[in-house]
Image (spheres, rainbow, N blue to C red):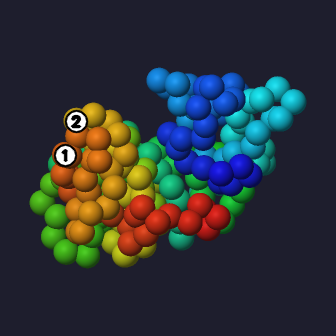
Amino acid sequence: MKDKLVMPGDQLSTSEELLPGDGTFEENGIIRAARIGTYIIDEKHRTAIVKPASSTPVLLKKGDVVIAKVIVAKPTMIIADVVHVTGKKRSVSGDTDATIHVKEIAQGFIKDASTEYKTEDYIRAKVIQVKPSVQLQTKDRNFGAIKALCSKCRHALVKKGHGLECENCGNKEHRRIADDYGALDMKKL
């Protein structure tokens, strides 16, 4: 996994192998990524580091494909924080708060947006408006959740058939998922 692009929460190493460094944190003896970036190992100090993609920020524009973390899931909308613009190896600048109106989640009718995404899900979405506020949509097949956590035990959910399941506690959950959920090519971010 060395020198690869990683997502927040991805397991990088154990605390027995390496120390947590910049852009990482330790949780129950596991070193995890704290941000989207490139995972590297500082051999001299035996430290795991996640370097941000770049220090030059990028401004959001209409048509950008982004990765966002769901902050609040309401019946009429999803509120998310844009954390990365795909194809740009730079951090996001300016207003990163975004919303997805219930009608922008899928092609068909969605009664309640909070049934499609949950707090702390990472989603891939398209920017459809930047002024006066950032608006996203996830109607296409390649948009939707790319990483989700179990509502009961907070372990990563894996794709099983048409749904998601927690391999830790067996809980089954529904999300609107991207077509590559679970097989995400981090190099394409």
- Residue at image mark 2: 152
Instruction: Name above or below for residue 107 compared with residue 2.
Output: below
Residue at position x 51%, y 55% in the image: 67
Q: Is 121 situated left or right of 171 in this image?
A: right
Amino acid found under the numbered disc labelled 2: Lys
Q: Is 164 situated left or right of 1 in this image?
A: left
Are the two marked residues, 1 and 2, in contact with CB atoms closer than 8 angstroms?
yes
Q: Nearer the viewer, residue 54 or 156?
A: 156
Residue at position x 23%, y 62% in the image: 163
Q: Quick one: label 2, few (<14), some, or many (20+) residues within 10 Å?
A: few
Residue 61 visible to the viewer: no
Which quadrant would residue 73 be assigned to in this image? Answer: top left
Instruction: Name above or below for residue 184 compared with residue 79.
Output: below
State the quadrant of the C terminus.
bottom right
Q: Nearer the viewer, residue 125 or 3?
A: 3
The percent position of residue 131, horizontal first and vertical second, equals 50, 56
Residue at position x 87%, y 30% in the image: 44
The percent position of residue 16, horizontal first and vertical second, equals 63, 26
| Mark before the other along the chain sequence, 1 or 2 | 2
- Residue at image mark 1: 171
